[in-house]
Amino acid sequence: MQNKGVSVLTQTEAGLYCPGGDFHIDPMRPVPRALITHGHADHARAGHDTVLATEETLQIMATRYGEDFCATRQTVIYNDPLRIGDVGVSFHPAGHVLGSAQIRLEKSGQRIVISGDYKRSADPTCLPFEVVPCDIFITEATFALPVFRHPPVHDEIRKLLSSMQLFPDKTHMLGAYTLGKAQRLVALIREAGFDDIIYLHGACEALFALYQSFGFDFGQLSPVADHDPKSLTGKLVLCPPGALNDIWSRKFGDTIKACASGWMRVRARARQNGAELPLIVSDHADWTDLCRTIRDTGASEIWVTHGQEDALVHWCRGEGLDAKPLRLIGYGDEEPAA
C-alpha cells in the first residue's frame, strides 16, 4: 500500500494487519490476536490465540468449530470504544448476519472502517447497518456490477408463498445458506403470515437453536429427520443450497425447488442450482447500496476486496475518489450462496 492509511493498516500473508495494535482483522491463518467481523467461515477461522468479536459471533464460532476454537476470547459491544496499543477500536453493526460488525480504527486522526460483509435491506434477525463516517472505507464487492440490483425482499417471499398456494400437492424445498440467510428467510416468512410448521435439514438445526438462544422466535420448526419425507407434501422444507440436487432431495417425491441467493439474478446461476423458483435474496449489499454506502461514509479513499473489485474501483474513480483493489485471497469462499 502506498497511501496514507498504511500507517494504520497494512497487509501480511495472514491478511489485514494493524501494527499499532498488533492484531489482524479476519485473518486467513492462525495469528496471536484476531478481530473478527462476523461468523461466516471465510472471515472467522479457528486456531487464533485470542479472538475479539461480538458475543453473537463468538457463539457462532463456538457452534461451528467447538468451544476450543481459540485459546482466549474477548467480547466487544457495539459502539463501545476500546484501545489496543495506540489504536482506537470500535465495532458497529454491519446488517449482514447476527453479530456482524464493521470495525473502526483510529490513529493520529486517521479513521479506517473495515466493513467485512454488509447489507442495508430488511433483516429482522440482526441489527441494521450503521453508517460510520471515515477517511478510508474498506468495502466488499460481491455484487459490484450494475446488473445486481436486488428487488424488495418481501416481494421474493410473496413469490414463494404464492407458489405454495398454487401447488399444494408439491413439497417446496427452499435452499438457503445455513448461517444468516436461512434464519432471515424464516423470520420474513413468518412476518408474511405463514404459520405452518417449517421443516429443517439437519445442517440447519444447530444454528437455528443458537439464534433461538438469543431470543429469536421462528414459530414451529421440526427436523426433517423426524418425518417420512413423502409425508411432507404441501409443506416447506429448508435446506442448504447444495442439498437441492443431492440424493437426499429425491426422497421427497414431487417437489418445487427454490433457491434464495443474490446470484439468482443470473439465469445461468439459477439453472446451475437447479432452482425452478429462484428468489433474489442476499445478505450482501447490491450495486445500488454499495455505491450509496461509499458516498454515505464520506470517505475520500476506498479499498475494495473480495468480489467484483475492478468494477467498483472504476466506479469510485469516476466519482473522484481514490480507490484500489486489495486482492486479498481467501475471502468470498461462501459467495456461491451469497
Image: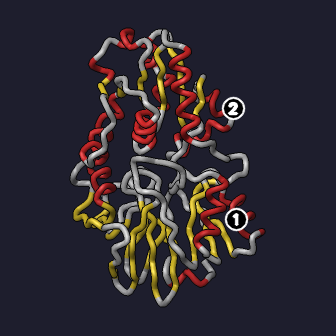
* Image coords of residue 322 (percent x, y): 69, 75
Residue 158 visible within the image: yes
Residue corresponding to mark 2: 267
Residue under label 1: 313
Tell me which residue sits at (27%, 65%) in the image: 75
In the visual, does 238 lie left or right of 153?
Answer: left
* Residue 189 image point, x, y percent: 45, 33
In what element is the residue under mark 2? helix
| Image coords of residue 22 (percent x, y) | 37, 78
Give above or below for 269 relative to 81. above
Q: Is residue 251 visible?
A: no
- Report the residue at 57% width, 79% height from top: 135
Residue 69: name its quadrant.
bottom left
Front-most of residues 148 and 66: 148
- Residue furthest toward the right? 318
Q: Nearer the viewer, residue 332 or 298?
A: 298
In this view, which residue lies farthest toward the bottom?
Answer: 108
Q: Amino acid at mark 1?
A: Val
